[in-house]
Structures are given as structure tokens and as C-alpha cells.
Amino acid sequence: MSDTFGAAILAPLGTRLTGAERRFFADADPLGFILFARNLEHADQIRALTAELRDSVGREAPIFIDQEGGRVQRLRPPLARDWLPPLDDVARYGSHAARAMFLRYRIIAAELMALGIDGNCAPMLDVARPETHPFLRNRCYGDSVESVAEIGISVAQGLMQGGVFPVVKHIPGHGLAQLDSHLDLPRITASRDTLETVDFAAFRPFRDMAFGMTAHLVFERIAPEPATTSPEMIALIREDLGFNGLLMTDDISMEALSGSVSERAEASLAAGCDCILHCNGDITEMLAIMRRAGSMTEAAQGRAEAALASRPAVVEVDIAGLAADLEALLPGAR
């Protein structure tokens, strides 16, 4: 291991590390890790896996997960509460939605930390439209910049007060996509003015967050490449949106991007992303990625160190009491 992190966040394949994975992670020294349903069986196993991952790199590496609620929820009962899709909860809590989402994600943070997981890929700041692809739409928080920003702040605060790193996504905005970027490359033809006043605007209040994740889609009136691999779009994220944190890619296994995964990784880093996110646990792909990605640049390392140094302290609360408070916010309970 060197003093510089490997420019990646990687995923194990199974419920415990193999010897090959342990050796690979020790050598690659990725910034952190991410877990999926395939990695999660029971509480003791998850705690053992998170300990193994950190031991492999010899430090308290961040371990992320997608625990949004609804379809994108890796932990299910009995490991964690089941949650409605975010947009459904926003609708049913009405004028109390911001407080409800704070409570929801504070409870989620407690559930994650109990398992050794200290990063959640939320808040999702994509502004919903009637035409937003179904894979994304009910994961959104609203259809206006104001509602998305207000609830996004509540989500981030709930996670941080529970000691969990939020990851704002999908920068600079996925709400206009009418294709699923896991399978296809969405192309956005909206004017720069529309993007500036709606999609991009939703991210500006989050410029000082520790971690952010890119969007795999083309903004045709700005640049010809997907945002993740576009120097012009990454410059826009840094300069126009003012995002100062560690910028990771969305999963480079997704089919919105072309070329091999190692070529995608190289293009993303060349465009200005700090870190590659690779999620499928394929060690052959990870080896190829790390041969191209290598260690973080000096600028990326500085942002990574600043992000990790901002690790939020846990604000102790009564989780059962918060759950009761959340229930009391429902219209029928008042």
C-alpha cells in the first residue's frame, strides 16, 4: 500500500473475501468499497465482511451502499426496515415531507452503521418530469428545484447525523433521461437555459458535500460525450455547479458507456473524475481497471483526504422515538 489511494471504489463478489480478493485489494488499495444484495446475508456476516474489507487495506476505508428505499434498497427485513420509494413517501407526508425524510434517513443511517456501512448513495437530486424513465422517477424527491433541494438537504442531514457519508447523485442531473442508463445511453436535447435553471440548479446547494456521483448521459447542446467521460461536463460540474468534493463515476459497468471497462475508467479519469466506481465484483475487470486507473492524482487525493476528514460524528438519538415521530407525521395520525 502506498500513501496514495487507488483511484477506485470496488465491490467484493460474495459474502466473504476470497484469498485472491484480499490480495488484490491490499495491492490496489482502493479508496473504498460498495456492497450489494449479493454480499448481504445476515448481520454478523455483514459485519465480518466490512471488517475484512477494511483490514485488507489497513485503514477505516469508507464502505458504501445504495439504500434509497423502494426498488433501490439493498438491505431488506430483517436486516433493515422496508421503505417506500422516496417520491411515494414525499407525496404521503405532504407538507411534512422534509422532516419525514430527515427522520427516514436518520433511521437508515443507524441501520447502516450497525453493520459497519458508513456511506449511502443518496440524496438523489434528479428533478422528476412526467417523461422521466420509470427506473428513476419514483426515486426522485419532487418535480421542482425547490422541493428537490429542500428534501435533499434533509436526507443529507439525516445521514450525516447518523455518522454516514452522503453521496449526492447523479451530477449534473438525470431527470430528463427517458432511457435506463444501465442499458442504454440517454441523450438530453434540452436547452442550456433549462438545464441551468432546473437540473443543474438542484445541485448547487450541495457544492460542499464530501462525495458526489456522475450521471451517464449526453447533454447534446453542451458536449458530445457522456458526462462521466466528458472533460467539458466535468469542468461544468466543478466550475458552474461549484462542486468541491470527491467526484466518483456512476458504475462503469453500466451499458450507457462504450468500450471496455478499463477504457471507460481511463476516459473517466482523463475527463476529470477523481475515482472509478465499479460494482459487479468481477475481479478480472477490476484488475484491468486498476492497471489503467492506478493511484489518484494529487488533486483527487487531496479531495479524498478532505472528504474522509469530514467524517460526520454520530448524534445520539432514540431510534424507536424517531420511528414514532415519523409515524406521527402521517396525515391520518394527526
Image (cartoon, grey):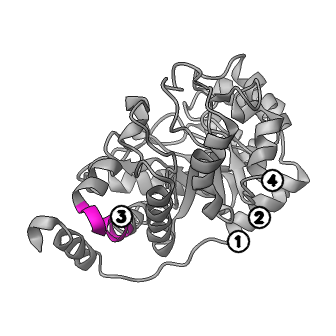
Query: Chief secondary structure of the magenta span?
Result: helix
- Tell me the SS state at disc 2: helix
Mark 4–mark 2 Cα distance, whole angstroms, equals: 21 Å
Camera sees residue 79 = no
- Tell me the SS state at disc 4: helix
Circle nearer the N terminus (4, 3)? 3
Q: Badge 3 is on which residue?
A: 101
Which quarter of the image is occupied by the C terminus? bottom left
Residue 220 or residue 316, whichever sits in front: 220
Q: Look at 9% across and 66% down and name the residue there.
A: 332
Mark 1–mark 4 Cα distance, whole angstroms, equals: 23 Å
Does the magenta portion include 85? Answer: no
Q: Badge 2 is on which residue?
A: 305
Q: What type is the residue that disc 3 sits on?
A: Met
Q: Badge 4 is on which residue?
A: 239
x and y percentages locating residue 279 in the rendered image: 56, 35
**In contact (CB < 8 Å): disc 1 and disc 2:** yes
